[in-house]
Image: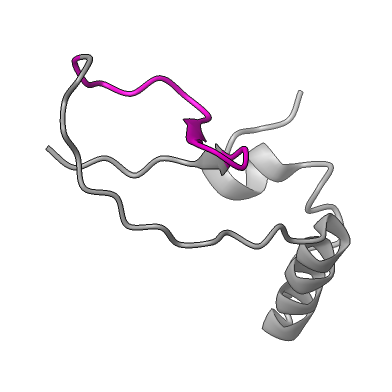
Amino acid sequence: MSQTIDAVFDGTVLRPEEPLQLQANTRVRITVVEVVPSNSTDQADSFLKTAKALRLDGPPDWSANIDQHLYGEQTQ
C-alpha cells in the first residue's frame, strides 16, 4: 500500500497531519520532499492572470443567470 501524507518535523520526529492507515510498529520507507508554503495572494494573482489570459467571452448576464446559460434552465 502507498500513501502520500503531509507531516511536520518538530525537530525530532515527523508528525503526520492526519491519521495513518497503519498498524502500530509497521515498518515503512519515507521519502522526504520539503513543501514550501505558498503565499495565498500569489495563488490568487496566478488564478486571475490565468483567467484573464483565457480571454473568455460570455453574455453580460452570465453570473446572474449561470444555471440558464449552463443547463438551459428557464428563470422564473
Residue at (23%, 14%) from the top-left corner?
A: 24
Residue 37 location, x and y as percent?
71, 57
Residue 13 location, x and y as percent?
49, 36
**Going by the picture, which residue comes out furthest to the front?**
12
Kindly report the secondary structure that dominates the magenta region of the rendered protein: loop
Colour option used: one colour
Q: Indicate whether residue 12 is drawn in magenta.
A: yes
Residue at (19%, 39%) from the top-left corner?
A: 28
**Residue interval drawn in magenta:** 9-23
Task: Locate the N terminus and report the quarter of the image it occupies.
Answer: top left
Q: Is residue 58 above or below residue 40?
A: below
Task: Locate the C terminus and report the quarter of the image it occupies.
Answer: top right
Given residues 59 and 51, the one toward you in this image is 51
**Going by the picture, which residue comes out furthest to the top?**
24
Residue at (32%, 57%) from the top-left corner?
A: 31
Q: Is 58 on the left or on the right of 19, as rendered?
A: right
Q: Is residue 38 above or below residue 54?
A: above
The image quarter in which residue 64 lies = top right
Given residues 70 and 25, the one toward you in this image is 25
Residue 39 location, x and y as percent?
82, 60
